[in-house]
Image (cartoon, rainbow, N blue to C red):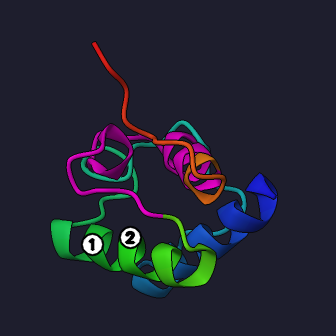
Amino acid sequence: MESQIRSFVIGIIGEIDPTVDETVSDDLPLGPGGLELESLALVELLVQVEHEYGAEIRDEDPAAQPTATLGEFVAAVARSRHGVSTETTA
């Protein structure tokens, strides 16, 4: 399932930046220094993932932050689909 989610996420990011494709590394941050998503684009990504997969990732969740990597975001979406909170406790 994570590979389907990853493809969906990359498709959305690819609409913003056509240079992003399936070969992009899971280690790249979503924001600065990586995929360079601005906050509005990140919100749009969250909305589309929620609509497509029913995954609820809150804005304050570490996986929804620009510092989260593509791999962390995809894993959080997969966990959220199964009703597991993606928030971590300290």
Q: Secondary structure at mark 2?
A: helix
In the drawing, does residue 71 fall left or right of residue 34? Answer: right
Q: Position of residue 57 (x, y in %)?
A: 39, 57
Q: Which residue is mark 1?
A: 43
Q: Would you place residue 82 above or below residue 26 in this image?
A: below
The structure residue drawn at horizontal position 37% and vertical position 36%, both measured from the top left corner, is 87
Q: Label 1 is placed on what type of residue?
A: Val
The structure residue drawn at horizontal position 27% and vertical position 72%, both measured from the top left corner, is 43
The structure residue drawn at horizontal position 81% and vertical position 58%, both measured from the top left corner, is 1
Which image quadrant: the C terminus?
Answer: top left
Residue 46 is marked as 2
Q: Would you place residue 4 above or below residue 40 in this image?
A: above
Residues packed near mark 1 inside 10 Å, few (<14), some (14 to 19) or many (20 plus): some
Q: Position of residue 37 (x, y in %)?
A: 30, 64
Measured in 3D between alpha carbons, the distance from the residue under mark 2 to the one under mark 1, in whole angstroms, is 5 Å
Q: Label 2 is placed on what type of residue?
A: Leu
Q: Position of residue 12 (x, y in %)?
A: 52, 80
Write down the region rendered in magenta: 56-78
Of residue 75 and residue 27, the one placed in the foreground of this image is 75
Q: Is residue 87 magenta?
A: no
**Can I make out residue 18 in this image?**
no
Q: Secondary structure at mark 1?
A: helix
Q: Are marks 2 and 1 in contact (CB under 8 Å)?
A: yes
The structure residue drawn at horizontal position 23% and vertical position 57%, both measured from the top left corner, is 59
Residues packed near mark 2 inside 10 Å, few (<14), some (14 to 19) or many (20 plus): many
